[in-house]
Amino acid sequence: MTHSSSPAETAGTTDPPGLDLGAVSRWFDANVPGCQGPLSARVLHGGRSNLTYLVSDGHSRWVVRRPPLGGLTPSAHDVGREFRVMSALRGRGVAVPSAAAHCTDPSVIGVPFTVVAYVEGRVLRSRADAAGLTPYDLKRCADGLVEQLARLHAVPYAEAGLSGWGRPDGYLRRQLDRWRTQWDLVATRPLPGLPRLHKALEETLPTESAASIVHGDFRVDNTILDPTDLSRVRAVVDWELSTLGNPLADLGTFLAYRDPAVDALLDTPAATAPGFPGQLELAEQYALLTGRDITLLPFYLALAYFKIAVIAEGVHARHLKGVTVGDGFAGAGDSVPELVTAGLAALGRRGAVL
């Protein structure tokens, strides 16, 4: 998830879980410009979806991404999509890492993987990472994040070569259908509130509006910040859910991650820390920068809660199977009912979800 170095690295430099270092080294020699010898690798924290590694030859550093072990929803872990969109956005006003290489040959490590440049910086993943920051610091950080989101949504996707990146028409309908289907793939227990939220979203589905490139999982810990200026985003990462769609859906996701309902999923993230601007303030700042009408924001917020609930259940399912890598996954299952409750509340629907 992050390209930041220590303390966001786990120990170990040989064959971390999911990465055959010998095979990767041979592939690097043939495909990554500037590689100068044997590689070492470490798992980076984060990555509740795709697995992320810091790889070095002793001279240069890269970040390698591959799908999760035991993934149940392969379409949601397409590292090739990440690589293509970051390549297209380079030099267009959005902070993205420089894409280096993409391996599509499953014979190397069993799955596709991508290589991008390492980006030095600060990641505010947890409230501990935000300790000592003032409300002013957090406001500057939030301003930088909203500016990046506005910049992304302003990119003319046809000029960037991404006309076929997605199908803007019917995007919201497909999102509802897709995440409902994903739930059926990953669900570990019955949760009547989730189909109830799905039905409420269907009943309030708005008419489609303007389309843009959407990140799909935009939040503070999917960005790398300048350590001396938190308003400056050095890189936006984790593009696996990106597509062409409704920009307000992207905004809704960003706002949903401000809700303490995500605390169990993300292990008390920085975005829910006291002092970080609230949902309404963030939404108003976005509207000011973009000129977009946010009247129907409750729908987009509820859609985000629905999507994140399904993502959390997928993390929970992989944790139960013992195929997650790293720490911080045990609480994902507890977050699902809270997220569903928050989604229903956003639409004015109350009542038990279990």
Image (cartoon, rainbow, N blue to C red):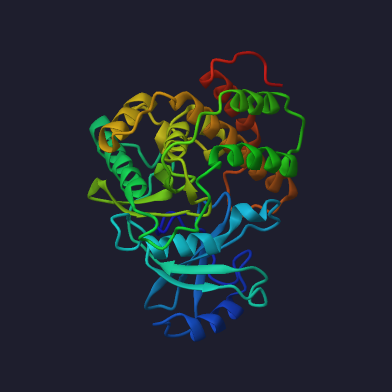
In this rendered view, identify the residue nearer to me: 335 or 176: 176
- Which residue corresponds to the image point at 66% horizontal and 25% vertical from the top-left? 199
Q: Is residue 180 left or right of residue 277?
A: right
Q: Is any part of residue 188 visible from this angle?
A: yes
Q: Is any part of residue 127 visible from this angle?
A: no
Q: Percent from the top left, x then y, of residue 45?
A: 50, 53
In this rendered view, identify the residue nearer to me: 7 or 200: 200
Q: Percent from the top left, x then y, of residue 260?
A: 49, 28
Q: Is residue 22 left or right of residue 96?
A: right
In the rendered image, which quarter is residue 173 located in?
A: top right
- Which residue corresponds to the image point at 68% horizontal and 71% vertical from the top-left? 110
Number of residue marks: 0
Q: Percent from the top left, x then y, of residue 235?
A: 35, 55
Question: Please, is residue 194 above or below residue 143 in the view?
Answer: above
In the rendered image, which quarter is residue 109 located in?
A: bottom right
Question: Please, is residue 20 above or below residue 200 in the view?
Answer: below
Q: Is residue 76 left or right of residue 189?
A: left
Q: Percent from the top left, x then y, of residue 134?
A: 26, 33
Quarter that holds the C terminus: top right
In this rendered view, identify the residue nearer to me: 117 or 211: 211
